[in-house]
Image (cartoon, grey):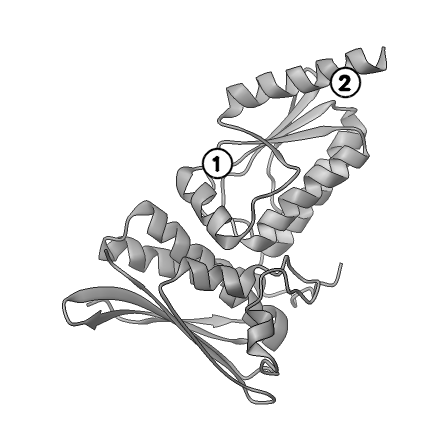
Amino acid sequence: MAYHIPPNRGGRLDIINIPILKIEDFLIASIQVALYDMQAIQFKDAVLQKIYDSKAKGVIIDLTATDVLDSFVGRLISDIAAMARLMGTTVVITGLQPAVAITLVELGLELPGVTTALNLEKGIAKLRQITEKNADGNA
Amino acid sequence: MAMPKVINIQSDLDIVAARMAARDMAKAMGFGAIDQARIATAISELSRNIYLYAGEGTVTVSEVQQGIRKGLEVVCDDQGPGIEDISLVMTDGYTTSKGMGMGMPGARRLMDDFEIISIVGEGTKITCRKWKR
């Protein structure tokens, strides 16, 4: 990815710790803070590695606490969903605030191919539905 | 009227700082949650452009008044390479592969006024405003 890494500045904390929790066959990560670009990239890598290590069937990225989603992070979320799909895992984005949904569409970022749900609970229900359907298809 | 805030853009940390400063001012001025998100997102796009294409520059956020209407003005200034073809960068989907090509046209849609002055080899100045309804 063509992206230039800024010089390390004093006191800079690049390593963030967004907990990626595992419940049954699913991973859940909730983004609670404004991510810097480098942190967002690290988050992507961490989610994909965790999918591989945990053999999760589905991932929920909860954005309930996110109040700004720009094209950089929007693209990253699309990328995570596409990359997880290549690995055989479904990603569901949950909890988009009305203001975030409005600005995303006005920005021209409708996140095609990204599955979403209103909240965490509905997101888990959706993941169950998708993963069970996939399991039936494979049987 | 609040004092203008100047944010130096030199790294990705400053992108977040710029949009937080704009959001704080928008909130203090009484903009609603959706306009706050529009302003913060537009500033995020424009300050990222400074960081990616010019390396560094400044974002100045201030309160403006025109007659009885009040607005928030954002000026993004850099001494970067400049934009050769402004109409091209304002086209949806045009990208130099660093983004989704939504930054500039998206930021224009999110704000009310949007002006670009760019001289190749000298830099770019973008002034945009959001008016209170």
Q: Nearer the viewer, residue B7 or A137?
A: A137
Q: Which residue is at a point 21% across and 65% down the rendered structure image?
A: B70
Q: Residues within 10 Å of mark 1 (few under 14, many from 20)?
A: many
Farthest left residue? B68
Q: Chain of mark 2?
A: A
Q: Which image quadrant for residue B3?
A: bottom left
Query: In the rendered image, is residue B17 in sight?
Result: no
Decide: is A121 above or below B57. Answer: above
Amino acid type indicated by mark 1? Leu
Query: In the rendered image, is residue B126 in sight?
Result: yes
Asked whether, in this view, residue A100 is left or right of residue A18, the answer is left
Q: Nearer the viewer, residue A2 or A99?
A: A99
Q: Nearer the viewer, mark 2 or mark 1?
A: 2
Q: Which mark is residue A96?
A: 1
Report, in whole angstroms, how far the alpha carbon at label 2 lies from the one at label 1: 26 Å
Q: Position of residue A24 (x, y in %)?
A: 68, 15
Q: Position of residue A92 (x, y in %)?
A: 62, 30
Q: What residue is pinned by disc 2?
A: A134
Quarter of the image for the C terminus of chain A: give it: top right
**Is there CB contact under 8 Å for labels 2 and 1?**
no
Q: Which residue is at a point 34% across and 52% down the rendered structure image?
A: B35
Does label 2 or label 1 sit earlier along the sequence? 1
Q: Are marks 2 and 1 on the same chain?
A: yes
Q: Nearer the viewer, residue B78 or B109?
A: B109
Amino acid type indicated by mark 2? Asn
Q: Residues within 10 Å of mark 2 (few under 14, many from 20)?
A: few
Q: Chain of mark 1?
A: A
Q: Position of residue A62 (x, y in %)?
A: 54, 32
